[in-house]
Amino acid sequence: MAVTSRTLQLIRAMRTAVGGYADDTVRDLAAQWVAAWDRLAPTWVQAVDVLVAWALAHGRWPTPVELARVEPLQQALAATDDALDELEAATTAAVIAAADLAITATVAAEPDVIASQLPSPYRQDTRERVASAILPTVLDVIRNRVTQQITVQTRPLSVDASAAIRRELVRGVELGSNPTDIARRAVAAVNGAFDGGLQRAANIARTEVLDAHRTAARYAHDANADLLDGWVWLATVTGASAVRTCPSCWAMHGTVHDLDEAGPLDHQQGRCARAPKTKPWRALGIDLDEPADQTPDRQAAFDALTDQQQAAVLGAARLALLRAARIDWSDLAVTRDNPAWRTSYVPRPLRDLNRIADQRR
Ligand SMILES: [Zn+2]
């Protein structure tokens, strides 16, 4: 019940650590992508020179069949496919390793997070009790499931980037009179498609590492159901980053959920946290008055923003509806199914909010 400033501090530290694992992975993968392209670039410059000479001689870009006959191009594609296969394997390994660190950090922190909500004489016992309820065998099952999930996400990386490069080559570039300029644009197009793989890999890293953290937290909470009443969705609603929190996460902040409910199911690359909510002290046999809960109040946090900041968060139209009480905070978030990923809460489209407001008139 009594989320303390210490609880919030511990949760923030845990989320920062987990975010750091994801960021480190993204940085590491970006470096690998750049190094791989540096190795491939000379091969592509050569291949594209041949291609541009052909195109200028014929006055048009080659057809797919003609492209297939350009030997240096086929060599560049083969080398690129090999590099992409290696990058895909490196991505899978790096994201699995980071997810593993996230799980370890989460189960290490949760006993403190829960104990911080109780009076200090009870904390040490609670910490030990919470920690001993988190079973290594179950964590192994979670790690295996996370590994599988990451592998499913990363598997199409190489094939998709390779296909994107081939599409660029078939599309070709507009011919001008300057061969150097044509070649530069053609190499840039291939490089762009190659880097598309990195964008995907980075998104997978950020999303999967955070989801591994959430899965571990959910288990740690569920295993300690005798101490807990549920979990609270914490978004960033205070401090300098509050203006970057989306309407959906603002709407979900402070909502209480069942322990067995996954989450917070924020959108991809979301940064919301799951705070365990301990039972009232007296329900736990502690005969003391509880201090007030320190979870930032959503309305108070929003009211603390300037008009300009409020409009930046919600957009002018949403803000007007909310201020006129024609919609509630709870209207601002809606779940969206994603067959390739998972269900998540996203901002409800303005069109739907207008319909809701009209119906309530
Ligand atoms: Zn959000």
Image (spheres, helix red, strand yellow):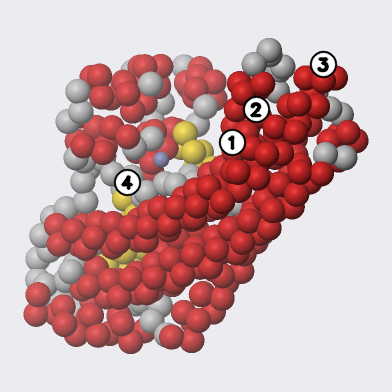
Discs 2, 4 touching: Cβ within 8 Å: no
Q: Residues within 10 Å of mark 1 (few under 14, many from 20)?
A: some
Residue 127 picture location, percent across and down: 23, 80
Circle 3 sits on which residue? 59
State how far apart marks 1 and 3 are (Cα): 25 Å
Query: Where is residue 7 shown, x and y percent of the image?
Result: 20, 62
Q: Is residue 95 left or right of residue 186?
A: left
The residue positioned 38% from the left and 81% from the top of the image is 134
> What percent of the width, then of the height, locates residue 248?
42, 37
Q: At 76% across and 43% down in the image, what residue appears?
A: 72
Q: Quadrant of ligand 1?
A: top left
Mark 2 element type: helix
**Amino acid at the residue labelled 1:** Gly
| Marking on residue 46 | none
The numbered disc on residue 192 is: 1
Q: Is residue 170 left or right of residue 351?
A: right
Q: Name the residue that disc number 4 marks.
A: 235
Q: Are marks 4 and 1 in contact (CB under 8 Å)?
A: no
Residue at position x 37%, y 26% in the image: 314
For this orientation, the residue located farthest to the right is 65
Mark-to-mark CA distance, 3 and 4? 58 Å
Helix, strand, or loop for circle 1? helix
Sequence order check, earlier mark of 3 and 4:
3
